[in-house]
Image: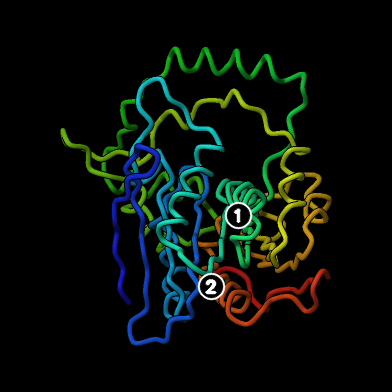
């Protein structure tokens, strides 16, 4: 297994891109782009990325802007979904010259939907891991969101959120992710933190991400992008303890070629809690097809869930 981390200048920012390639395997010619969720990082895809790379895929997992080892937006900037999409479009042009498959988890799933809907001819296959977007916001929330955003931005301190030790980081991850085995979280903590130049340990994300976005999520806009996606799409659920917007089924129905797989005990952080099962399902989908018939919808339960 060859694993590397590279810095790419994308839209004026240095983005860290983690790449996984299997040694002594026949390349499939397919580049798999893995997009992480909120407060996560591209490096934590490793448990899933490595099996996919051993199958011959070129696996690319970027830290999205303001997360992990990627640069933060400068003063006066903010994080909007079109920014993520523009970054992904630029990375795809540079790193996936031919065939492309995309996997998006949670927030990364929404980014994947916007990209695949805007560039439907570019994506060969798409997998959304509980990535069908948040609940829709009503128009009556628009003013309140901007007011909250202005207040939070005025009070924002972008000093990294300090941790007393790696043990402290692990304890916080355990508290926030009770369904993920502790031994897995022990390996996640170093990937989600970084040593600060002046010393000390901190979470590796811009504290600005914790503010309320002034831009509302409109399901009508989101579904318009879903309707433009023409490639086979795999919807992966983490079961009853996962994340499911109230109108999830209606959103999935907007996809032309959708297949559903459930990892019933995985929960939302399935790429940590059920990495082996998830990698197997993704390997089947990207390697051997995935849809039983074009334009149809097939649902099958996974043979095993998370650990």
**Quadrant including the N terminus:** bottom left
Reading the image, the residue beneath label 2 is 279
Which tag, 1 or 2, sits closer to the chain's start? 1
Q: Residues within 10 Å of mark 2 (few under 14, many from 20)?
A: some
Q: Residues within 10 Å of mark 1 (few under 14, many from 20)?
A: many
Give me the C-alpha separation between circle 1 and circle 2: 15 Å
* Residue located 29% across and 56% down the image: 6
* Residue located 81% across and 46% down the image: 247
Dot label at residue 110: none
Q: Secondary structure at mark 1?
A: loop
In the image, 71 versus 148, the foreground residue is 71
In the image, 287 versus 264, the foreground residue is 287
Side of 83 where 203 appears, left or right: left
Task: Say which of marks 1 and 2 sits in front.
Answer: 2
Side of 278 where 24 appears, left or right: left
Residue 15 location, x and y as percent?
35, 46
Side of 44 where 296 appears, left or right: right
Dot label at residue 268: 1
């Amino acid at each position: 297994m060859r694993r590397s981390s590279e810095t790419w200048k994308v839209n004026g920012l240095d983005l860290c891109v983690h790449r996984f390639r299997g040694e002594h395997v026949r390349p499939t010619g397919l580049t798999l782009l893995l997009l992480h969720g909120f407060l996560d990082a591209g490096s934590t895809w490793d448990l899933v990325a490595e099996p996919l790379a051993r199958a011959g895929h070129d696996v690319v997992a970027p830290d999205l802007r303001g997360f992990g080892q990627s640069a933060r937006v400068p003063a006066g900037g903010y994080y909007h979904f079109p920014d993520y999409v523009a970054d992904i479009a630029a990375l795809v042009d540079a790193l996936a010259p031919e065939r492309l498959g995309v996997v998006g988890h949670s927030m990364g799933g929404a980014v994947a939907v916007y990209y695949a809907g805007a560039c439907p001819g570019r994506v060969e296959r798409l997998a959304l891991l509980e990535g069908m977007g948040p609940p829709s916001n009503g128009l009556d929330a628009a003013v309140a969101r901007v007011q909250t955003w202005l207040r939070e931005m005025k009070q924002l301190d972008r000093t990294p959120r300090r941790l007393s030790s790696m043990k402290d980081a692990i304890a916080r991850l355990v508290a926030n992710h009770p369904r993920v085995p502790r031994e897995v979280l022990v390996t996640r903590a170093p990937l989600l933190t970084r040593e600060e130049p002046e010393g000390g340990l901190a979470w590796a994300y811009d504290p600005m991400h914790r503010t309320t976005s002034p831009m509302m999520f409109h399901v009508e806009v989101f579904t318009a992008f879903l309707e433009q996606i023409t490639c086979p799409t795999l919807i992966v659920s983490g079961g009853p303890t996962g994340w499911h917007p109230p109108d999830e089924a209606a959103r999935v129905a907007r996809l032309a070629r959708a297949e559903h797989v459930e990892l019933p005990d995985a929960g939302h952080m399935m790429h940590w809690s059920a990495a082996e099962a998830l990698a197997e399902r993704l390997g089947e989908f990207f390697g051997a097809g995935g849809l039983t018939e074009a334009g149809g919808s097939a649902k099958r339960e996974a043979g095993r869930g998370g650990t």
